[in-house]
Image: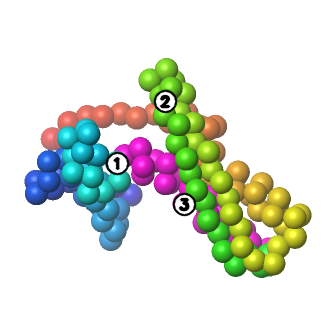
């Protein structure tokens, strides 16, 4: 799959991210020269973690017949040390439904094993950048 990011010249910094049939506007905050008309790349990175935890938790609960009625993941970023090599994300999982403490702990363990969490913490990602012909 190829994801395309295409400049939107109607904004100072705005681009559109095309993922299959989906389009997401991205921008920079006004302090960085954008118009804050969409999330910035850091927001998307952080959101990928929260979305993966939510979807993985729901998939597992359905598969195991755990009666989760609602799932919310709040991701808080601490990028204060990013330039020094440390980027911290704190994901808080809120579960709704008639769940026992044991079921809640089981779902918490599952959320910690989502593929994006693993990708961010246990995998070496290699990135290459080249000019298109």
The N terminus sits in image quarter: bottom left
Q: CA distance from mark 1 to mark 2?
A: 17 Å
Res 100 seen here: yes
Residue holding disc 1: 40
Say which label, 2 or 3, has the lower sequence index.
3
Question: Are the two marked residues, 1 and 3, in contact with CB atoms closer than 8 angstroms?
Answer: no
Residue holding disc 2: 80
Residue holding disc 3: 51
Q: Position of residue 42 (x, y in %)?
A: 41, 44
The C terminus sits in image quarter: top left
Callout 3: 10 Å neighbours few (<14), some, many (20+)? some
User: Residue most toward the top?
Assistant: 84
Query: Which residues make up the magenta segment?
Result: 41-64
**Of the two numbered discs 2 and 3 in the rendering, the one whose residue sits closer to the viewer:** 2
Indicate left or right for 83 with 14 as reference.
Answer: right
Point 52% across, 42% down: residue: 77
User: How many labels were placed on the picture?
Assistant: 3
**Of the two numbered discs 1 and 2 in the rendering, the one whose residue sits closer to the viewer:** 2
Point 58% across, 56% down: residue: 74
Callout 2: 10 Å neighbours few (<14), some, many (20+)? few
Point 20% across, 36% down: residue: 131
Q: CA distance from mark 1 to mark 3?
A: 16 Å
* Up-down relation of residue 24 to residue 41 (above or below): below
* Disc 1 element: loop
Point 35% across, 53% down: residue: 39
Residue 56 falls within the magenta-colored stretch: yes
* Disc 3 element: helix
Q: Position of residue 115 (x, y in %)?
A: 61, 52
Question: Are the two marked residues, 2 and 3, in contact with CB atoms closer than 8 angstroms?
Answer: no
User: Residue most toward the left?
Assistant: 9
Indicate left or right for 45 with 24 as reference.
Answer: right
* Disc 2 element: loop
């Amino acid at each position: 799959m190829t994801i395309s990011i295409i400049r939107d010249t109607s904004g100072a910094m705005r681009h559109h991210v095309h993922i299959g049939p989906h389009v997401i506007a991205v921008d920079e905050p006004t302090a960085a020269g954008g118009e804050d008309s969409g999330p910035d790349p850091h927001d998307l990175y952080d959101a990928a973690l929260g979305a993966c935890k939510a979807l993985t938790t729901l998939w597992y609960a359905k598969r195991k017949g755990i009666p989760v009625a609602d799932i919310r993941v709040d991701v808080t970023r601490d990028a204060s040390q990013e330039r020094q090599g440390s980027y911290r994300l704190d994901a808080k999982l809120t579960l709704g439904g008639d769940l026992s403490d044991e079921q809640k702990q089981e779902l918490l363990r599952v959320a910690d094993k989502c593929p994006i969490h693993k990708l961010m913490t246990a995998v070496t990602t290699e990135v290459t950048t080249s000019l298109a012909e």
